Image (cartoon, helix red, strand yellow):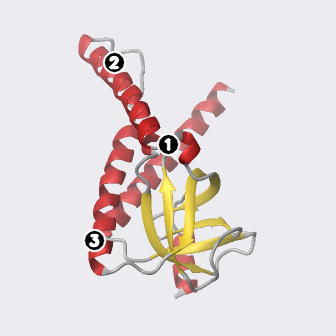
Amino acid sequence: MSEEAWKGFSERVTWDGRFHATCEPAAPPAAAALASINDRNANVLVAVAALMDRRVDTGEDDNALSQEVARLDAKLNVLMEIVNRLLLPQSALPPRISLRFNGLGAVLPWEGLPPVGQPVLLKLHFDVVRALPLELPGVRQAGPLDGKGFVAFEGLSEPVRDEIERLVFRQHRRQVAEARAHATQG
């Protein structure tokens, strides 16, 4: 299973970044707890997607409606930052670590990871809703041999996996667009 999970993970697009995250040993959740985790994860993914998707401002559409939407967007950003700071201050967040993930698993530093074969719970905090982490149950497995470890997610529902894949793809597409924009400007 480990090689199969690693191969599946490696063949998909991943989001590579620095996230506030923890990965700790945890017993595999019971069916009811897993259903609750999947429900919470679905809600977190909807919030992350909505808050991360930004309309590209071309400056060509200066009608009153677009200006009002921009003002509402700015107000929502401020409100979300206030809520984030109240619910989970920066000092209460786990440290940022380099992490690469998709709907099948995550690669993160070996340091502090449980041994291979142990069930874990990876909690991943996004900056846009840092008080609501993704809770990703899995199993620590053998992975790359570059000082990193691999966690294969287990028990995530298909809709949650699909939403993670969409989020990762949108982030990848955003990074490619930004790289192209910088290349044409430079």
Asked if disc 3 and disc 2 are in contact, CB closer than 8 Å, the reply is: no
Q: Nearer the viewer, residue 127 or 49?
A: 127
Amino acid marked by disc 1:
Asp
Q: CA distance from mark 1 to mark 3?
A: 25 Å
**Other-residue count near label 2 (Cα within 10 Å), few / some / many at <14 / 14–19 / ≥20:** few
Which of labels 1 and 2 is toward the front?
1
96 to the left or right of 76: right
Rendered location of residue 135, percent (x, y): 43, 63
Q: CA distance from mark 3 to mark 2?
A: 37 Å
Nearest to N terminus: mark 1 or mark 3: 3
Q: Nearer the viewer, residue 56 or 139?
A: 139
Helix, strand or loop at label 1? It is helix
Indicate whether 97 appears above or below 120: above
Q: Which residue is mark 2?
A: 71
Q: Which residue is mark 1?
A: 127
| Quadrant housing residue 86 | top left
